Amino acid sequence: MLHVRNLSIHFTRYALGLRKQEVRAIRCLDLDLAAGEVVAVVGQSGAGKSLLAHALLGILPSNARIEGEMIFRDEPLTPERMARLRGREIALVPQAVTYLNPLLRVGAQIARAARLSGLTRARAVEAAREALARYHLAREVGAWFPFQLSGGMVRRVLTATATVGLADLVLADEPTNGLDRETAAESLKHLRELADAGKAVLLITHDVGAALEVADRVAVFCGGVTVEVAWAGDFKRTGLLRHPYTRALWAALPANGFSLPGPSAHVIRLEGGCPYVSGCLSHGPACDAGLPDLLPADRGLVRCRHA
Amino acid sequence: MNQADAIYWKPWQWDRRTRTLAQVAACLALFTTIFLMAWLHGDHGLTTHLELRKQAPSVMHPFGTDWLGRDMLARTLKGLRISLGIGMGAAVCSSILALFLGLSAALLGRKVDTVVTWMVDAAMASPHIVLLILISFACGGGPKGIILAVTLSHWPGLTRVIRAEVLQLRTSDYIRLSARLGRSPWWIARHHLLPHVLPQFMVGLLLLFPHAILHAAGLTFLGFGMSPHTPAIGALLSESMRYLSMGLWWLAVAPGAALVVTVKAFDVLGTNVKLLLNPRTTRE
Amino acid sequence: MKNTIIPFLGKKAVRLAVLLAALAVFSFILVSVSPIDPIDAYVGASILKLSPEQREIIAQRWGLNDPPLERFLRWAGRLLQGDFGISTIFNEPVSTVIGKRFMTSFWLMALAWTISGVLGFILGLIAGTRENSPLDSVIRLYAYTMAATPTFWVGMVLLTVFSVSLGWTPVCCAWPPGLSADQATLWQRIHHLLLPAVTLSLIGVAQITMHTREKTVEAMRSDYAIFARAQGESTWGVSLRHAVRNVALPAVTLQFGSLGELFGGSVLAEQVFSYPGLGRATVEAGIRGDVPLLLGIVLFSAVFVFTGNTVADLTYLAVDPRIRTGGDKP
């Protein structure tokens, strides 16, 4: 359903003295997503992954520039097309309660999301009630304000806004941020249900463990670059993972012994060649020359000269 | 250190930065011109030519002449110079007072802080003009009275800003660290506090000029600074009031417009300097 | 909610009392050090005709020869009983003068306040929603220029254009000169009110516009605005459904907090149009050394501004749902 090729996102910003700077948040991102599957984009916090969701919806700030291809249902995503599809065929599940209007009641906000996705006014109100019920929220929750919701309820409300309509592509941005194990597991379960119901779910997170619980495939993101795309099952043994960065991520998982230093201790290079430099055992002079291509290897894809 | 940014620099072009710098330069040029021209004109334009009374603007007299035949352009320039002098002087004094109070509040302990904060609130409790009139009255009128009045009523805003900034800095980690590493308070003040407070102070000072000048002009207009030796713009306009109903519109429009342009220039200057020193507030 | 309002008002009352006390002391000290001799100021041009004995009688009557502390206590004592003294200019009790003059100014200020509030909000909302558009630039230019313009000059220009050149509006006063206050009709009063009100509004709109614009921009860049856009809301949809709600409260707060500026503006505007309101009285009191009146106005205006600020705080209490529902999470 969704294909992303060579995506890069640049920002212009102003430093002291009003000097213009260009900042490249995403350097080269590749992704494929089909209906019925959950693909996780996994990487460091602040690595620019959230921008991917905003880019797919066409709501990046005006000082952003996009290069590369984004293809949805076999047609490219132009700004005009994205404006039409936002909220209708592509929906966002945001990170936190700050994404809800603090002065509007929860039920009204869900109903508005339903209305924007194409339902009639009456049908939208009904759909909002149904959505609340589906996520086990009492009817009176609809009359509450966002500040009255607990952490778990916030998660459910945010998921409800994305699923109250008819969207087929759901973008979940950091769905387990700041949640305890139980609530996080529940949140992920919802996403799995959506995929099983036939939707395509893109899961953006920094929590590798969480991703592995529900994802079918995992795209590993390092320094603005997709370095590997692997099946979730491959994560059972480090031998099946090909990119050195992915291996380091795997080794840092609690189940595998928390081996130190973790991947965040290493220097990530943002220009020139491969981003994963200082922790890489196979690093060679060829790695500094330029970014390798994303090539098939076994069942997945990897961007490494030494895989 | 992980940063998902790749930074490279763009070459020079006619962009935001150069535009801002150009605006700053233009404002400074304007002020210099005003002072220079006022000084060059001297008292030359103030001689009365009774045969040229009440003339509308023309090539010879771009701002017209008044009821005594004096050139309005010369009078305006002189008035501007006086008004700017009074306003800038008062603003500088006010800013220094604000700096002193703000620093004291943030650095000298809670008691001083409470007193200063309360003073700020109290000072902002009355309408500005009422306070100005009261202080002016207390000084018996005259230009000194105006400067004092404006000085004593404009410090609250900047005091708050400086106090907030220094309070925030004081509790920041790197200052605590410096103190623990044994640096003296003077060293910390010079190397950590000053670089942050100084820009805020500069911008606050610059942005205080327009307010001070306008309030001083208001006071002189109302008649509080009246003295024949200091025909500030406000006084000029006050005198012109009498002749408005006779249709001598240029007596009011021209000097007022000149004042607006000058004050606006200060505004532009202050805003642009603020942009240069704190670009975080802008987005392309 | 009742539980929060009563103690709130109580605290505010105490603050007001303390403030007024401090202000009373401060202003009294100021007028005492003034070199302006109240007797000279009162008598004015007839000063040459005053013999030393006559001066002494007046000084006795006004208690001018007593030590400052005694004078202050006497004044403060009378104040607490509601007696503000007698105005030397108008020869009426100060409270009567303030009362009459305030009523005249009230309509002027109310009209200007309403116009600048409504217009300022609308313009600010438009400018903030369509940020950096040509319309926004024009609105900003207007607001910034007005902020640099003296109120009295705007009044003078309007006077020249509309009263002198076009003759559409009167040149001075609150009703046609020669008539007494009761004889003037409503229409005449409004006619005389127009130009000063427009003067005040033109300047007032600027400040409100800029503040509303800033809040609107902030709201349009917030997380909930981004999410609304992600759901497919158009720019104006985001603005009218989300931003407006979140901007309305700060806007109303600012409106009530702008009473100080309003009063200040009216002082200048009334001078230009010779409008016999409280502002004009302040100026006359200052120039002609009418100490009782001046002190009375200082205290009155402080109460006026304080009331405005308190109402602003109250609206926050009343409207913010977090506070309304008691802030408890069920």
Image (spheres, coloured by chain):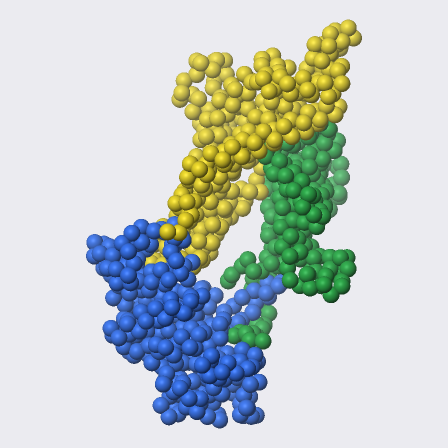
Image colour assigned to chain B: green
The answer to whether A180 appears left or right of C81 in the picture is: left
Say which residue appears at 40% left-offset and 75% top-offset: A210
| Side of A89 relative to C173 (left or right) | left
Residue A254 placement (x, y as % from top left)? 47, 79
Task: Please state if A20 lies on the left or on the right of B45 as rendered.
Answer: left
The answer to which of C248 and B165 lies nearer the viewer is B165
Place residue B145 in its image quadrant. top right
* Figure quadrant of residue B85: top right
Q: Which percent across, then down, holds residue C250?
A: 46, 45
Q: Is residue A157 above or below residue C101?
A: below
Instruction: Look at the image and tell me whether residue B17 can be seen.
Output: yes
Quadrant placement of the N terminus of chain C? top left
Colour that chain A carries in the picture = blue
The tint of chain C in the picture is yellow
Residue in the image at 28% along x and 72% along y:
A193
Q: Nearer the viewer, residue A5 or B73?
A: A5
Q: Pinpoint residue B106: horizontal percent, then vertical percent.
A: 67, 49
